[in-house]
Amino acid sequence: MSRALMVVVILVGVSGLPAAGQEIHATFRAEQHAAVSALLRDNLATLSETCRYIHANPELSLHEEHTAALVAKELTGSGYEVTTGVGGHGVVGVLRNGSGPTVMVRGDMDALPITEESGLEYASKVTAKMPDGSLVGVMHACGHDIHTTSLIGTARLLSAMKDQWRGTMVMVAQPAEEVGVGARAMIADGLFERFPRPDFCISLHVSHKYPAGQVSYTAGWSAANVDSVDITIYGRGGHGARPNTTIDPIVIAAHVVTQLQTVVSRRVNPIEPAVVTVGSIHGGSKHNIIPDEVRLQLTVRSYKDEVRQQVMDGIRQITNGTCTAFGSPRPPDIVIDEDYMRACYNDPALTRAAADLFAIILGPENVIEEPAGMGGEDFGLYARTLGVPGLQFSLGSVSRERYEASLKPGGSSLPSLHSAKYQADLMPSVKYGVETLTMLALSLLEEGGS
């Protein structure tokens, strides 16, 4: 059985995205799927053991030394040309197999500073020292252990199936996704100059909302620009009983926080998503002391670059204007982190083709379309930098039993990603992660054989 899937989508007016008229050809071949299934049966036990090891031995962002070494060893063993130390602890494996498209698969390796409470027998007991000297637990609470293992498994299967495809595979094990700098660092270190330039960029991300065996997708914008903004508002401190002798930065900050809510509601086009959240406010030390300054920390979300700029301009204008109106002794400090996380855009044609492919593999009832969200994910920077189609889809990861129990009246909600209690059903998650990534890559490569 063979089935060709082809969608044509006209893309217009979004900077850094594929050109208008981009066509995506994704082909399902039954003989390839049969080979993938057979190889998975042979490799699933060892891949699951690898995933358990990675889960039990997590490493924080920018410290993925041992995980990177494990990936490099696996890719080398599968016949890839391997380069380490790309953009920090990044690993790149290249497998050239004749003329044809170049497909990049990315898996991220870093963990989170969370003390694990999953109850798993292979739960992390790793701790790390934070900059302030405190110790914190380290956990793969965002599924990067499954992402990395899926990358390794996909690399193994594609190498074993070289007679069935033509083209070039670029496997990217990325550091520092959680802090939003890993993709940028690898690109800055020559990812697209030193290695084959991809025609497609694909990846997966686990989901806590669906059971293993289901996937979900979002066409178009799927994750937001994520900016961190630090604001310091200055006043003139004094005694709380004599506020008339002071310039109260807490009152100024309160007005700023309130006015910032109008940036989205009154400046941004209502059909363009954006978020401005003040997540932290610090000022003062005692009931009866008016402080000299107050510090605010904001997270700002948007999709389009022009909307991001509009929101940032609004934050500056409102903060500066409010401080001036209240007579602040000096202008506020407004620091916008230059290393912001770029929004992720899933090419509509590639997304539709992948969804159709997954429906054949998993059954249409197990392929779910999801609305866009405002979370962050730096994977989108790869395709946007190149102007080629990119896609990140979501992989269900919880056990069927826990999922169904959560749907019953009074059932417990499923722990979210970044929760100390997040628990993936590891073996089926790895199986479906490798199967979907491998089949998607094969569908984009040229058919092999004589």
Image (cartoon, rainbow, N blue to C red):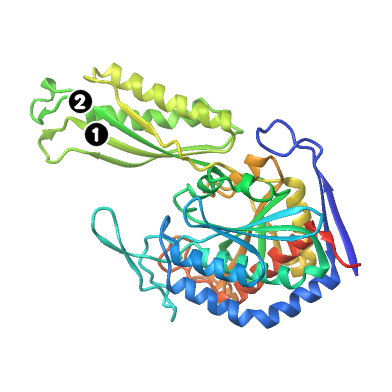
- In the image, residue 342 lies at what x, y percent? 54, 41
Instruction: Judge left or right: residue 300 versus residue 230.
Output: right
Question: Which is nearer the N-term, disc 2 or disc 1?
Answer: 2
Quadrant of the image occupied by residue 202: bottom right
- Residue kind at label 1, given as amino acid type: Val
Q: Residues within 10 Å of mark 2 (few under 14, many from 20)?
A: many
For the image, the number of numbered tags is 2
Q: Residues within 10 Å of mark 1 (few under 14, many from 20)?
A: many
Q: Secondary structure at mark 1?
A: strand
Name the residue located 68 percent from the left edge and 38 percent from the top edge. Answer: 17
Name the residue located 57 percent from the left edge and 48 percent from the top edge. Answer: 373
Residue 180 showing in the rendered view: yes
Name the residue beneath numbered marker 2: 235
Residue in the foreground of this view, choosing between 363 and 168: 168
Name the residue beneath numbered marker 1: 294
- In the image, residue 178 lies at what x, y percent? 46, 53
- Residue kind at label 2, given as amino acid type: Gly
